Image (cartoon, coloured by chain):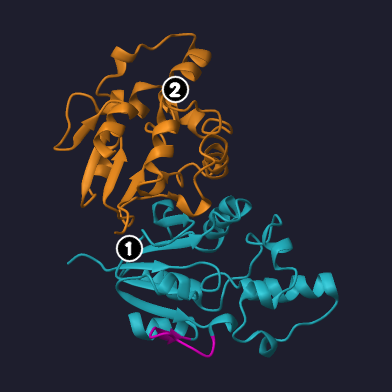
Chain colours: A orange, B cyan
Amino acid sequence: MAQKRLLVDMDGVLADTYQQFFRLESNITGKKIQREDVIGVSEADAFPNYLSYVHKAGFFRDAPVIENAIEVMKKLNNVYDIFIVSSAMEFPNSLREKYDWLQEHFPFLHWKQIILCGSKIPVQGDILIDDHFKNLDYFKKTTLLYTQPHNMGRDKGHQRVNNWKEIESILL
Amino acid sequence: MAQKRLLVDMDGVLADTYQQFFRLESNITGKKIQREDVIGVSEADAFPNYLSYVHKAGFFRDAPVIENAIEVMKKLNNVYDIFIVSSAMEFPNSLREKYDWLQEHFPFLHWKQIILCGSKIPVQGDILIDDHFKNLDYFKKTTLLYTQPHNMGRDKGHQRVNNWKEIESILL
């Protein structure tokens, strides 16, 4: 039987971009933003200097990996036809950085499994794990909404997952 | 009515990579390979130093644009929901180069319309213009085979187009 095609977002699902947001915002302003302050607020609105650092070299390359993502992805990669699907084109610096980041942290993924795009609408599969409604709402099959502060408080009909252990128990 | 989604390959369809192959091979070896010598031969087999220059900085950035591609794409972009879908992940240098190349030659395309991938299999639309059977054979809907030396002599059931004027007359 053909493996199911599983599409996995990067930022906010594999890469802990919020840790980067909190750290860099604090470096620039000296002010520590708390997680509870940014619930339900878009990333661009939550962090006043958002645009300055997502366009800066190194922002994506240096992002920490979200807990348990590597070990669970390794298991999923044996069972599913996995593609990493990441919106990268808005930030051209991020193209090479995202490739290098995946090579470092997810070396078991082949380059054929990476898709860097603008809009995700033409990319189809059986399951999509993503933290943004703008991607999940267009997806035709099973969706998993990965919890991040900006999406808390509503699920718009998508199944919510709070961490990679929950993904493991649903998909494996 | 929703616009049809048209997927357009870059290398060998928008970008004249063969001109690069001929030029660079001649620079390296001093030997001029003729177009008739490489009919039906894969690019990697036709050009002995293929791997050395596709991995070199500038190869994709400096490629000439295929004749009439810009003017016809401009017209198509008003009528179709266009996405550029390019296999770039094998050559990580090419990621930024392809983005910059599109910005220079096709500035009327939005970054949301660019998809750089490894495999094109998960990317779906209504029409695909491509020069490689490995992409066309997996596509579920209408395919247009763009003539390049490596694909001459067989069409495997795909409709062949020899230049952008032919694409214009078919799609517009």
Q: Is residue B14 magenta?
A: no
- The residues tagged by marks 2 and 1 sit, at their Cα atoms, a distance apart of 34 Å
Residue shown at 40%/57% (left/top)?
B113
Q: Residues within 10 Å of mark 2 (few under 14, many from 20)?
A: many
Per the rendered image, the range of residues in magenta is: B152-161
Q: Chain of mark 1?
A: B
Q: Is residue B155 left or right of residue B124?
A: right
Chief SS of the magenta region: loop
Residue shown at 49%/25% (left/top)?
A64
Residue B33 drawn above or below residue B76: below
Q: Is residue B165 left or right of residue B17?
A: left
Residue flagged by tag 2: what amino acid is it?
Phe
Judged from this view, the residue extending furthest toward the right is: B30
Residue A150 image offset from top left, x and y in percent: 29, 26
Quadrant of the drawing holding the N terminus of chain A: bottom left
Residue occupied by mark 1 = B124
Residue flagged by tag 1: what amino acid is it?
Gln
Do the residues marked 2 and 1 share a common chain?
A: no
Residue B149 image offset from top left, x and y in percent: 59, 83
